[in-house]
Amino acid sequence: MAEFDTIIKGGTVVDGTGMPRTRGDVGIKDGRVAAIDGLRSSDATTVLDADGLIVAPGFVDLHTHYDAQLYWDPWCTISGWHGVTSVVIGNCGFGFAPCRPEDRDRSMLSMTRNEQISLEAMQVGLPWDWETLPEFMDSVDRIPKGVNVLGFAPLSPLMVYAMGGYEVAKSRRPNSTELKTIQRLIHEAMDAGCAGWSVQRLGEFSIQPDFDGTPMVTDLMSDEEGFAFAEVLRERGEGTIQLTYAPIGKEGLADLFNQAPVLAWSERLAELSGRPVLHNIVQSADGFPEMHQGFLAWLASCHQRGLSVYGQGETNRNFQQFDFTTWNGFDIAPAWKAALMGSPAERLANLRNPEMRAAMIADRPWLMAIEGLGMKLDNFDVVSAGGAAAVEPYVGRRLGEIGTAEGKDVLDVMIDLSIASELRAEFRSPLVRVPNADYTAELLTSGHVVPGISDGGAHSKYFVGGTYTTDLLTWLVRDTETLSLEQAHFALSALPARVAGIKNRGTLTEGAPADMVIYDLENLKQVPEGIYETVKDVPGGDWRRVRRASGYRWTLVNGQVTFTDGECTGATPGRLLRNGRG
C-alpha cells in the first residue's frame, strides 16, 4: 500500500500561517495533510508535479449567498472556479429556513430582487425537504458538495417563523414573547451546527429591499433586538455575528456616511456577546485615505479594549454589467427603485412615463455615493445594443461622450437607449470604487479585515464578486507587490477561518484537512478580462454573468481534486462544517 494517497511534489509551499514560504512536497492521506517536505523517497497513488507553482491552503469565502445555488451547483461557482474550498452561507439575515410550507413561495420571492435569484430557478432547484433550520442543515448535509459549507442562522426567516408569517413580521416588531422564541430558534440552529447569526439592517430606505421594494424584515430592527440575540452567543460561549448595517434614512446620503451609530452597535454586540462581530463593510478608495484609516483605527481600538470586531473588506476591483430588464443597482435612489420594479414590460412602461422619468432624473443627488467612490456616470460604457439597430452606433462609446454630443444628461442617455432597445441595451460601469493598492494592502495587513466581498450566488445579473481571490493575488501580490504571498494567504484562508470559527482549516499544517490550491502565479488571470460572460446554466432556463479563472492547476477539497486547469472533475468531497467542524 502506498504511503500517501497523493504527493504534491516540488512546489513553493505557502502554508497560510504567515511563516515564510518553503520549497518542498506535501503528502496527503485519508483527506488530510499527512506530511510536509522530506517526501522525495516516498511513494503515492497519485503524484502532482507542482514545480514552479504555489501550493497554498484553499480559500475561505465568508460572505456568500449560495443558499439556493448549492442545490444545483455543488461547487458553488463562481467561487469554486477561483480556488475557494469553503463557503459561508446565511449572510445578511437571508435564508430559506425556518419556513412553513405555506410561506415557501413568499420566502423565495424575498430573494428575487435584492439577491437577483429568479423565482423559477428556486422553484425548480430547491427540494424543500425541510421546515426548521436544523432540518435545512440536515438537507445541506445530505446533498453532494464540491466545497465545504458553514452557515449562519439568518434572522429574517427566524423572525418570520416566530411571528407567524410575513404579513405580521412586515407590519411590526417582535414582542417580548416572540423575542424569546427567536432566541430559542437561534439556540436550536446552533445546536444543529450554525456558526452564529446574521442580519441586514439598512432602515426604511433599504438599498437591498424585498421583492416589492419594501424593507426586509430585519431592516427596521432595533438595537435592543440585536442585544437580545447577542445574549444567546454569550450564554453558549460560541458563535460569530455577521452584520450588514448602514443607517440610510430619509435624508439619504448624509445618513449613509454617518458611521457613528453603526460602530456603536457593532461594539455593543461584541461586548454583550463576548464573541467576534464581522462588520460589513470596510473599504478603501483612492483619494479618500481617511475612510479606510478611520475604520482601521476603530478596529484596532476595539481589539485593544478586548472586543473582537473584524471588518469584512470590499477589496475586489469590479464593475457592474447590466441591462434594465433585471437591474436594481440604483436602488439607493427612490425613484429609480420605483421605476425598475416588476416585469420588463412594466419597467419599460415606467421609463416611458414622463413624470416617472422626471423623478428619476431629479434623483441624481442620491447617486452621489456611487459617483463619489469612482463609479462616475459619465464613464459608463455601452457594451451591447441588445439587438436594436438604433442602438448599434452607440456601442463602444461612453455615456458622457454621447451626452455631450447630443446635449443630454447622461441619465437621459441611459434611459433613451434602454427604451430604444426595449431594455436590452447593455451597459458597463467603471470600477465600483477607484482602487488604490497601498490602501487595500493597509486593510489586509492590519489583521482585522477579511478580504472579499464575493456575494457569491447573488446579484449575478450584473455583478461578479467571486473572483476576489484571483484579483487579490494578481493585483496586490504579483503586479504591485504591495502584499507578500505569506500575507495574502493568511488573509485569504487562515484569518477568515478563525473569524467564522472554522476549526483546523485555513492553513497547510500536518493533520489539517487537505483543502488546497496549486497555481501558477505568473499566468493567473480572470477570464474573460474586462467583461463578463453570460451563461445559461441556471435551473428553469435562467442565465447569469460569470468570470472563470486561468492559472489554477489543481484545487483540492478534503484531499480530492475538484478542478484541474479550470475543468471540474465532478468530485464532491465537500462537507457541512457543523459549528466549524467536519
Image: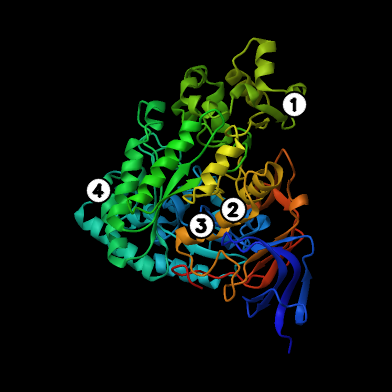
* Residue under the point 75% across and 26% down: 396
Location of mark 2 (residue): 487
Foreground: 99 or 58? 58
Q: Is residue 323 left or right of residue 263?
A: right
Location of mark 4 (residue): 224
Foreground: 374 or 408? 374
Question: What is the x, y in percent for residue 517?
Answer: 67, 62
Q: Amino acid at mark 3?
A: Pro
Q: Nearer the viewer, mark 4 or mark 2?
A: 2
Q: Nearer the viewer, mark 4 or mark 1?
A: 4
Q: Nearer the viewer, mark 2 or mark 3?
A: 2
The quarter in which the N terminus is drawn is bottom right
Question: Under tag 2, what secondary structure?
Answer: helix
Give the spatial CA distance, label 2 vs label 1: 41 Å
Q: Nearer the viewer, mark 1 or mark 3?
A: 3
Whether residues under marks 3 and 4 lie with C-beta atoms below 8 angstroms apart, the answer is no
Give the spatial CA distance, label 3 vs label 4: 28 Å
Question: Under tag 3, what secondary structure?
Answer: helix
Q: Amino acid at mark 2?
A: Gln
Give the spatial CA distance, label 2 vs label 3: 13 Å
Q: Nearer the viewer, mark 2 or mark 1?
A: 2
Foreground: 381 or 493? 493
Question: What is the x, y in percent for residue 486?
Answer: 62, 56
Location of mark 3 (residue): 496
Farthest-out residue, top: 407
* Residue under the point 73% across and 53% down: 521
